[in-house]
Amino acid sequence: MSIVVASRRAAPRLVAAAGFFLLTLPHAQAQWWKRAPVDFEECADAAEKAATKTEKTSALADCNAKFAGRRKAGGGYTYYDFLQDRTFDIAGPNPTPEEQKKIDESYTAYLASQRRSNEAAQTALRQQREQQEQQLQQVALRTEAERAPVPVPVERPKVLQAAGTDARPRPKGACAKGSFSCEWPRLSEGLNDLKKLFSPTPSKPAKKG
């Protein structure tokens, strides 16, 4: 009797468990037969069918995390490395270890090239600053030289000199050679001498004893 009562009490629980299993079976079968996306494009197409904008954004972010490559028009995939700002051709939706190694080696070479470019730019900038400093120093020197006082030359008295005459100063009382004022005393002396020759000498009076 007790066994029958226990069986009747357990019967509703068994029915409820069977119903739950039947309800969940179609959903499990649907997930089993659903194919996972093979690349980013298929994943993005599935994300577009999300019910809400939030779910769509989350699904696209998941696609970006799963697939690094993008389809090419002629077949194959391409990978964009934003650190180098360039793309690489890859075989599948994600780079293989060998492809990733080549991408890393290219990034190392890119860093070395950037370092050399930066050093060259710094050298050119330093040279330009030195040249500007030299130019400023030259301008300062010219400005200082222009501000320095210019010595004024002392004017000496000019000696008026007639053409054909001696520029040396004449002694006091001298006259110009050939002038009437200079020759007249000489002529006067000559006339006096002639007068003495032709004029008799007056006799002296005899002395009284």
Image (cartoon, helix red, strand yellow):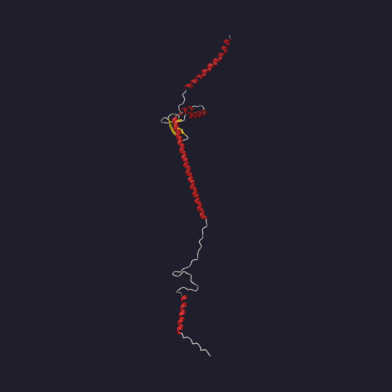
Residue closer to the observer: 46 or 3: 3
Residue 70 higher or lower than 13, as above or below: below
Nearest the eye: 208 or 106: 208
Residue 66 lies, in percent from the top left, at: 48, 28
**Residue nearest the viewer, comparing 48 with 110:** 110
Quadrant assignment for the N terminus: top right
Instruction: List x then y, in percent, for residue 121.
Output: 47, 42
Residue furthest right as drawn = 2
Residue 137 seen in the current view: yes
Residue 84, given in percent of the width and then of the height, sits at 46, 35
Residue depicted at 54% across the width and 16% down the height:
17
In the image, residue 77 above or below residue 117 = above
Residue 159, placed above or below residue 133 = below
Decide if residue 1 is on the left or right side of residue 60: right
Q: Position of residue 155 (x, y in %)?
A: 50, 63
Q: How many marks?
A: 0
The residue furthest front is 209
Seen at 46% across and 81% down, the residue is 193
Task: Give the residue displayed 50% in from the left and 20% down from the top.
Answer: 28
Residue 85 visible in the current orientation: no
- The residue lying toward the viewer, choosing from 160 and 154, is 154
